[in-house]
Image: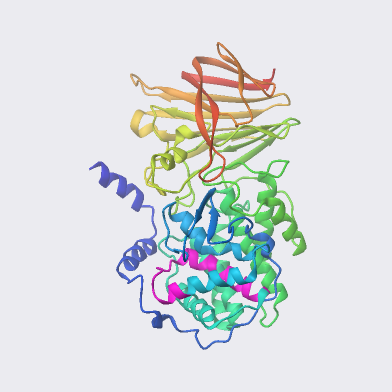
Amino acid sequence: MKKLYLYWNTIRFLKLKQIFYQIYYKFKAPLLPFILYKKYFKNPLYPIVLNTTVLINSNGKYIRNNTFHFLNLTHSFKNDVDWNFEKYGKLWNYNLQYFDYLHDERIEEIEKQRLIESFSAQLIKKKIPPEAYPVSLRLINWIIYYSKSGYTSDNFEKTLKYQIHFLEKNLEYQILANHLLENYFALFVCAYALKNEKLTQKSFLRIVKELKEQVLNDGCHYEGSPMYHCIILSKLLLIIDIIQQNTWININEEILREKAEKMLAWLNSFCFKKGSYAHFNDSADGIAPEPKILFERGKKLGLKIENIPLKESGYRKYVSRIYEAIVDIGNILPSYQPGHIHSDIFSFTLNYKGNPVFVDTGISTYEYSPRRYYERSTIAHNTVVVNDLNQSQVWGSFRVARRAKVNISNENEYSIKAFHDGYFKEFGVIHTRQFFIRSASFDITDEIVKKENINSVVVALFHLDTSVSVTELNGFNVQLSNGLKLCFQNAETVSINDFQQACGFNKLISSKKIVVSFSNQLHTQISIA
């Protein structure tokens, strides 16, 4: 019964289109005969005028002699590359198949072309099951490489055109969100390389449609991941660049510029002063282009970069002379695709004098594992946990069943107060949290309202960055190595525990967290010692 309840609370949020295509693609043969995807075989291929390689993280991913380095893991293939290699997980294999390393200028051209031919040969022989997401990224990389190097061969052109048709017939309607948008971005780039007016117009209209849904009014990509926001923004800037520099077809880019400027504005508002961003939801360093690179490219394209109030994304930013705080008070978005969402309502990150103090635990894996579950769970974030339960029921690697709902009581320039019902059905508990930034302190007030005769274990968690240590614990006061102190009023116990901070995929570093137990109310003041 519990499993049925779990599935029901997951499936009921999906769109009918997702359910249909989940079933349809299960029955559709994943390795249809190569010849069925020959629609573009007779179309000539044209180079695209562009200058976008700086937006693709490519350096250090290929170390020659069939040795690859992705996600902080290195592997060498003794003979030919096994393009289906999954010893390090699905995401590592995806990175192997993306071909980002084609843009690494330190690698000899003959070596890049050997890898292309190796992959092409195995794909033609149906030894590599094509998947729409890596196909999308690979197509863009191959076309950019072809456009800059002029490299071509019979196998290269054949497999390139095969993948274009495959993608067109296997769009990720079962997933939607960033996956579908990546599909459309790739088809648009391919349409320009084929000079196919019909495919160009079709993919352009679908990009516009998805951007209208996926870019919120405050400019954030609706999955709430700063990392994926940067990835999507980088592709949008690529599309604008292509339209500007290739004039064989007239495309009105104004709506794309409008969305790009909003996304740049959100990123500009969200980032800390030194240019980094808080790792809310599925976010990690070294995956997406850095904000400063996106800002530079935006300026080159003539885009305005302004600030925008954070609102619809569910984030708020509070800044004083010495503090920068970002808090998460948002509901799960989008409801039909919460794969990159964490159970982290009312979590926050805090920088002091430009340096991180309290951080999101981060992510180190997408593989189904206890670690993946932990990194998405409430206990891995700077918020309040009741009876070790998650606010929202994250499960699997990318699923969410029961969802907490947030209501904002009041807010102004310096503070916000909100409550959520994530613990109400199980324990009859409502959690309210207020953040208040002052010139010399950052204050947090937690209130637990519960039904009579309800016993509950309530803890507030504060995860310290690896650069910060605890120098003294004196009763309900904690002294930090950076000169800050925490005072906890109405606390029952305060302890210092270990945790593993994710500093990138497959990279964990030991750090400390402050665990505070309380009953009904807790007031936390973070100030200069």
Residue at the front extreme? Answer: 78
Instruction: Identify the coloring.
Output: rainbow
Which image quarter: residue 238? bottom right
Q: Quadrant of residue 245?
A: bottom right
Q: The N terminus appears in which quarter of the rendering?
A: top left
Question: Residue placed at 55% from the left, 54% from the top?
Answer: 69
Q: Is residue 247 above or below residue 487?
A: below
- Picture coordinates of residue 5, whole percent (x, y): 28, 45
Residue 461 horizontal side relative to residue 30, left or right: right
Please report the residue visible at 59 percent of the width from the left and 53 percent of the height from the top: 229
In the image, residue 272 lies at what x, y percent? 69, 41
Res 252 visible: no
**Residue 447: image location, x then y, percent:** 50, 24
Q: Is 21 left or right of 224, judged from the image as shown?
A: left
Q: Residue furthest left?
A: 1
464 in relation to 107, above or below: above
Q: Is residue 245 magenta?
A: no
The magenta segment is 121-148
Q: Estimate the x, y position of residue 38 in percent, counting from the top left.
A: 45, 83
Whether residue 303 sits left or right of residue 186 in the image: it is right
